[in-house]
Image: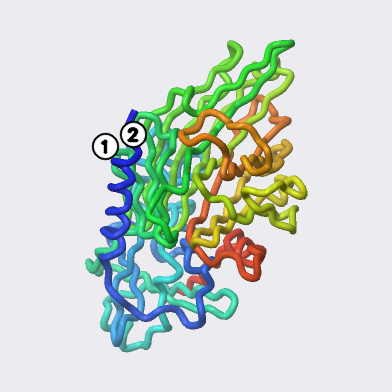
């Protein structure tokens, strides 16, 4: 077992290291909301016609800084066969040519790093500017420029994964993964939180099944899983893990998980194959939840539960969710908000509901956990899962503050679920 206090100290130190680097530049026009400040802009290769088939290394992304263009953190990512960022050396094969722009590849950077529109003089001084990227959303407008043959790069790094220690460090949060079992999470620190301590007990992934009269449950601590490949970029860090789950004698899941960390978000796509043999099971369910530590007083609600539940108190009503209305959000008065989404492969029919446990609600301790009791535990339960399919289970988490306005996160959750799209103009 690794020692959580040791890694907590490393986590705190790491937040400052990542936040200090970089070049100051003008911000986009308008007032960024808290949700917009978290957004990672994604531009598909198919929208960058001028770069198609070209090497990623030949280009820089730049914005207005003073009276000239300056580089911002950016990265190009190849895609894998399942449509997620490709990690060299991983289990999932690349879709296209490595290091050269294909239609499904992605260019990513932060919305908050964009700036005002550049003058013709600024563009000509920067070199061969091939594309203008305009980002416009709710009164906020920012521009970025793709420049060919410009070697300038920002030294700012938003996220980094240390494969030796298992520590995810970003500009605004850190999370300790067990380096030998990355599905086991422990200490989490958030920069905006008033106290210097972990706010997370652990992440819980459970698979429940029934075969005849026999029931079985396994959790993430029982699942063989390991990191097989890592890609650290300036904007996001991608960690590919491999997991295999057997239950009641059936090889249930052969899965890869691509953890994607950025300044304010953490995406966990579990890319699973559920064999036809699993149809012998009369019941199959998957639960994914976060068990928080000492967050009594937090308000929690979902898209289908307008009145928030308050951790530490008896809940007036259960939290509800569905595949269509799949978000949940929490807010603690000490400076921590979370927005979370759960989605599955489009077209796959299953049932989704919210999962909520709280010691103040009379719920019993729920193993596995490091700290006794749920304070609170929040997530989802997926049931009626089909067999003989490739199933992508995607959990996306946003960490920070000020997502709740007037005790209501609806506007922020809408912004996070509909990120701004770039308008690309060839120059």
Q: Residue at x 39, y 50 (%)?
A: 197
Per the image, the residue denoted by label 2 is 179
> Could you give the CA–CA distance between mark 1 and mark 2, rounded to whole angstroms?
7 Å
Per the image, the residue denoted by label 1 is 164
Q: Using the rendered image of the protein, determine whether residue 361 is visible from the camera's viewpoint.
A: yes
Q: Is residue 289 above or below residue 266?
A: above
Q: Earlier in the sequence, mark 1 or mark 2?
A: 1
Q: Is residue 285 above or below residue 175?
A: above
Question: Label 1 neighbourhood size at 10 Å, few (<14), some (14-19), many (20+)?
Answer: few
Q: Is residue 184 above or below residue 346?
A: above
User: Which quarter of the image is occupied by the N terminus?
Assistant: top left
Relative side of 162 to 112, left or right: left
- Residue 402 quadrant: bottom right
Q: Residue at x 40, y 37 (%)?
A: 240
Q: Secondary structure at mark 2?
A: loop
Relative side of 4 to 256, left or right: left
| Circles 1 and 2: CB atoms closer than 8 Å | yes
């Amino acid at each position: 077992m690794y020692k959580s206090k040791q890694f907590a100290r490393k986590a705190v130190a790491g937040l400052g290291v990542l936040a200090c680097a970089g070049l100051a530049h003008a911000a986009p026009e308008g007032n960024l909301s808290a949700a917009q400040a978290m957004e990672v802009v994604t531009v598909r290769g198919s929208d960058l016609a001028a770069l198609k088939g070209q090497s990623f290394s030949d280009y820089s992304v730049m914005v207005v800084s003073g009276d000239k263009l300056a580089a911002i953190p950016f990265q190009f990512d190849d895609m894998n066969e399942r449509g997620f960022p490709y990690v060299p050396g991983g289990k999932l094969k690349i879709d296209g040519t490595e290091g050269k722009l294909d239609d499904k590849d992605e260019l990513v950077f932060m919305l908050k790093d964009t700036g005002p529109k550049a003058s013709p003089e600024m563009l000509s001084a920067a070199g061969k500017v091939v594309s203008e990227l305009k980002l416009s959303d709710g009164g906020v407008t920012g521009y970025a420029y793709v420049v060919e043959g410009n070697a300038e790069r920002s030294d700012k790094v938003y996220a980094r994964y240390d494969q030796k220690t298992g520590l995810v460090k970003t500009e605004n949060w850190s999370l300790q993964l067990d380096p030998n079992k990355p599905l086991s999470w422990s200490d989490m620190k958030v920069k905006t939180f008033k106290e210097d301590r972990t706010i997370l007990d652990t992440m819980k992934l459970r698979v429940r099944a029934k075969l005849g009269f026999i029931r079985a449950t396994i959790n993430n601590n029982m699942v063989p899983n390991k990191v097989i490949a890592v890609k650290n970029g300036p904007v996001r860090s991608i960690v590919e893990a491999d997991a295999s789950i057997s239950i009641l004698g059936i090889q249930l899941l052969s899965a890869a998980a691509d953890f994607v960390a950025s300044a304010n978000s953490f995406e966990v796509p579990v890319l699973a194959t559920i064999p036809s043999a699993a149809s012998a099971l009369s019941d199959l369910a998957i639960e994914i939840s976060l068990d928080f530590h000492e967050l009594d007083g937090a308000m929690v609600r979902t898209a289908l539960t307008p009145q928030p539940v308050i951790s530490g108190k008896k809940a007036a009503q259960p939290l509800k969710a569905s595949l269509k209305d799949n978000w949940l959000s929490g807010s603690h008065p000490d400076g921590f908000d979370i927005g979370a989404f759960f989605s599955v492969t489009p077209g796959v029919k299953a049932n989704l509901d919210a999962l909520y446990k709280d010691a103040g609600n009379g719920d019993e301790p729920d193993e596995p956990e490091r700290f006794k009791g749920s304070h609170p535990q929040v997530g989802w339960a997926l049931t009626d899962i089909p067999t003989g399919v490739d199933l992508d289970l995607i959990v996306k988490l946003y960490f920070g503050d000020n997502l709740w306005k007037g005790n209501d996160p609806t506007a922020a959750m809408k912004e996070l679920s509909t990120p701004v799209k770039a308008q690309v103009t060839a120059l």
